Every structure is written in structure tokens, then in C-alpha cells.
Image: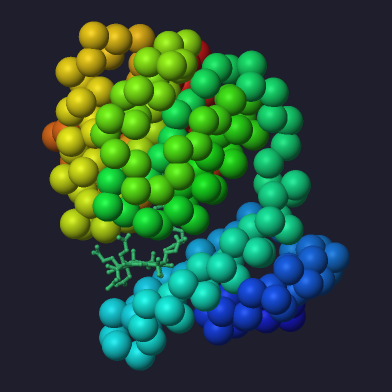
Amino acid sequence: MSIEKVNDLVIRGKAKLVPAAVQEALDEGCSATDLLDTMIAAMDVVGENFKNGEIFVPEMLISAKAMKKGVEVLKPHLATGATGALGKVIIGTVAGDLHDIGKNLVAMMIESAGFEVIDLGVDVPVEKFLSTYEENPDTKIVACSALLTTTMPALEATVAAVNAAPWRSKVKVMVGGAPITQEFADKIGADAYTPDAASAAKRAKELVS
Ligand code: B1M
């Protein structure tokens, strides 16, 4: 089955082969969400292999590249109807953190839900979130991703800076990423936490309605 092949190719970091395998699986009738889930599961295996010392950072990186190639093929199937009509969302991975696959998925699903997304990328300093809001005062949501326990303080600092801004009441703050919990989000004063990209898009719509 091509879906298993996709999982295996992402684990092995075969970026050149992943797009064709994803397309093949779609042609066989696999759903885009199942294919996304299998790639996320593949990255969990990669993470475990890294934790166990079986692979190292370069292997993690090539698996990430492979997944990104697969997501490119899935994008038209996952993201539809981008209109920007619901307003602007500023999104970024916090300072010190280079992980962007989850953040990109959240950006894609939020855009697809009808928002205009301003994606600041990875390793985004607190000041960049603030200055981007100030350049775009019609922004409805600031969304921050953190994937490392060591960058949770940067997430906290980012939310604290937004909470201290004079325009705080005009914007909602969303947070997420593997180590983040609802409890942590509440503690740092974020308006919303969601565990995955699909629920982030749903919550974003609720926050502005
Ligand atoms: Co990194 N890494 N990594 N890594 N990496 C993890 C996160 C890790 C869990 C692996 C492990 O040890 N098992 C571990 C963190 C441990 C911890 O903090 N407790 C780890 C580590 C240790 C590191 C380094 C420190 C390794 C080193 O250098 N010694 C280093 C740090 C670099 C840095 O950031 N400063 C590092 C580097 C890297 C690479 C650069 C090689 C690469 C990232 C490449 C890239 O992103 N372009 C990488 C990768 C690929 C991983 C794993 C294997 C996969 C991450 C991923 O893309 N997952 C990861 C293990 C794992 O996650 N299982 C690991 C798929 C993605 C779809 O899931 O990002 O969780 P995720 O997003 C989810 C949700 O979290 C949520 O939605 C998405 C799903 O729909 N979500 C949000 C995310 N953001 C959200 C925001 C929201 C809402 C939901 O609202 C705003």
C-alpha cells in the first residue's frame, strides 16, 4: 500500500521519492488527512529514533525535508477556499526554535479557514511579533508555535509581551506545539491552546466570531 510506503519514505528521508508516493496514494483513494497523519506518525518515529541515539540531527533534517515535499503535494487537497475575509493572523515559531513543519500546517489550515496569514517563519524574536502587529493593526490573532521544552520560556516571553502591549484587547493569542498544554497556555495568559492544526483553524474562527 502506498500509504505505508509514504510512512517508510519519510522515516528514511527519501525527499525525492515522497511526492510520487503521496500522489500514488491519493490516486489509490487514500484521504489527504490520512496521508498527513501517516507523515506525522513517521516524524514521531524519527523523533524516537533520535532520542534513542539511533539517528542524529542530519537524519532528522532530511526526514523533515521529505515530509515537507509530501505536504506540498497534499496542500491543494487540505487547503481550500483561502479568501482572507476573516482578517489577518500573524504566526511564527518562537525565538530559539527552528521547527516549522507544525507551524506551517497550522498556517495552511488557518489560511484555508479564510484568514490572511502573515508567516514570520522560525526563530522569531518577541520584538518581531510586536512590530509586525504594529505594522498590521487590523490583525485579529497572534499565533505562536514552540516545539522544544527549552523554548517554552520564549513562548511565555512572547505572550507576556503581547499581554503588556497597549493593543492587547484588540487581538487574540493562540499557542501550540508538542510540549505545550492547556495548563501552560492558561498559566502564561494565552487566549487559546490547540493540540493540532485542524483544531487551531477551528478555534481561530471561533475566536473572531
Ligand atoms: Co527536533 N526535536 N530538534 N528537529 N524534532 C523534536 C521536537 C524532539 C521531540 C525529538 C526527540 O528528541 N524525540 C526533541 C525535543 C525534546 C524536547 O524539547 N522535549 C527535539 C530536539 C531535542 C531537537 C534539537 C535540540 C536536537 C539537537 O540539536 N541536539 C534541535 C533543536 C534546534 C532548534 O530548534 N533550535 C532540533 C532540530 C531539529 C531539526 C532542525 C533537525 C528538525 C526540524 C526541521 C524543521 O522543522 N524544518 C527536527 C525535527 C524534524 C524533529 C521531529 C523529529 C519532528 C518535528 C515535526 O516536524 N513533527 C521532533 C520529534 C516529534 O515531533 N515527534 C523533534 C511533525 C509536526 C507536524 O508536528 O511540529 O508537533 P508538530 O506540530 C503539530 C502540533 O504540535 C501542533 O500542530 C501540528 C500537528 O497538526 N502545533 C500547533 C504546532 N504548532 C502549533 C501552533 C498552534 C497550534 C498547534 O497554535 C498557534
Residue at image x 66%, y 64%? 70
Instruction: In this rendered view, identify the residue nearer to me: 96 or 173.
Output: 96
Residue at image x 37%, y 15%? 134
Residue at image x 67%, y 81%? 5
Q: Position of residue 46 (x, y in %)?
A: 43, 77
Q: Kindly indicate the quadrant of the structure image that contains residue 163.
A: top left
Q: Is residue 33 left or right of residue 205?
A: right
- On the question of residue 24 being in view, the answer is yes
Q: Is residue 61 above or below residue 128?
A: below
Q: Position of residue 39 (x, y in %)?
A: 56, 67
The extreme right residue here reads 27
Q: Position of residue 145 (x, y in %)?
A: 36, 44
Instruction: In this rendered view, identify the residue nearer to me: 80 or 183.
Output: 80
Q: Is residue 43 left or right of residue 73?
A: left
Of the four image quadrants, the one with ligand 1 is: bottom left
Q: Is residue 201 left or right of residue 20?
A: left
Q: Position of residue 66 (x, y in %)?
A: 60, 71
- On the question of residue 7 being in view, the answer is no
Disc count in the image? 0
Image quadrant occupied by the N terminus: bottom right
